[in-house]
Amino acid sequence: MDSDIINVFDLMQRKESDLPTRLASQEEALDELTCTEPRLGRWFEENTVSYVLAAFNLSDEDFVEVFPDLKHISAVQRQNIIQAFVDHIERCPKCYRKRSFDLEFEGRLESALQENREELLAKLDQSGADEPSEEEHVIYAKARFAHNS
Ligand SMILES: [Zn+2]
């Protein structure tokens, strides 16, 4: 499982060897900014902005699986929260920046995955069905990058 995660990194670094350095400097840039509403912004500390928004957009069933502690939040409430997130990102210098870094990272990852599609598909065929999804790979990968730097 671990080797799969490292592979995604390798793919990205094959193209851009300075990627870890750049991610580290992005982390530093974010550290210098202050979130205007940490109640909302803390959600984006561990996960990418698009992941959080996608998670809140899940069906009730799937949402409870991702966030068992938040099962009391209804679908309507979640839509309101998404709107609050979106409004916050537009206003908050830190979260706005975080989103642009996330988008940049996801774009790079996407193109690395595209370029190495055949190799990755071959690898997926060999591994079991209980592997984490691609989305989870992204998050773990990014967290690892941040902590290793
Ligand atoms: Zn913020």
Image: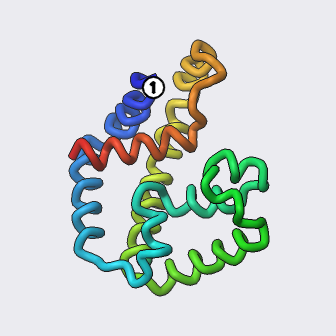
| Residue 38 vertical placement versus 106 (above, below) | below
- Image position, residue 101 (x, y; %): 40, 63
User: Ligand 1 is located in which of the four quadrants?
Assistant: bottom left
Provide the secondary structure element on which disc 1 rests: helix
- Image position, residue 60 (x, y; %): 78, 55
On the rendered structure, is 8 left or right of 53? left
Q: Which residue is mark 1?
A: 4
Q: Which residue shows up at 43% across the image and 67% down it?
A: 42
| Residue 106 vertical placement versus 133 (above, below) | below
Crowd tier of the residue under label 1, counting other residues whose Cα lies within 10 Å: few below 14, some 14–19, many 20 or above = some
The furthest residue to the top? 126
Asked which quadrant contains residue 79, the reply is bottom right
- Image position, residue 37 (x, y; %): 44, 81
| Residue 42 vertical placement versus 126 (above, below) | below
Label 1 sits on what residue type?
A: Asp
Q: Which residue shows up at 45% across the image and 25% down it?
A: 4
On the rendered structure, is 136 left or right of 73? left
Asked which quadrant contains residue 58, the reply is bottom right
- Image position, residue 123 (x, y; %): 54, 19
Q: Which residue shows up at 52% across the image and 46% down it?
A: 110
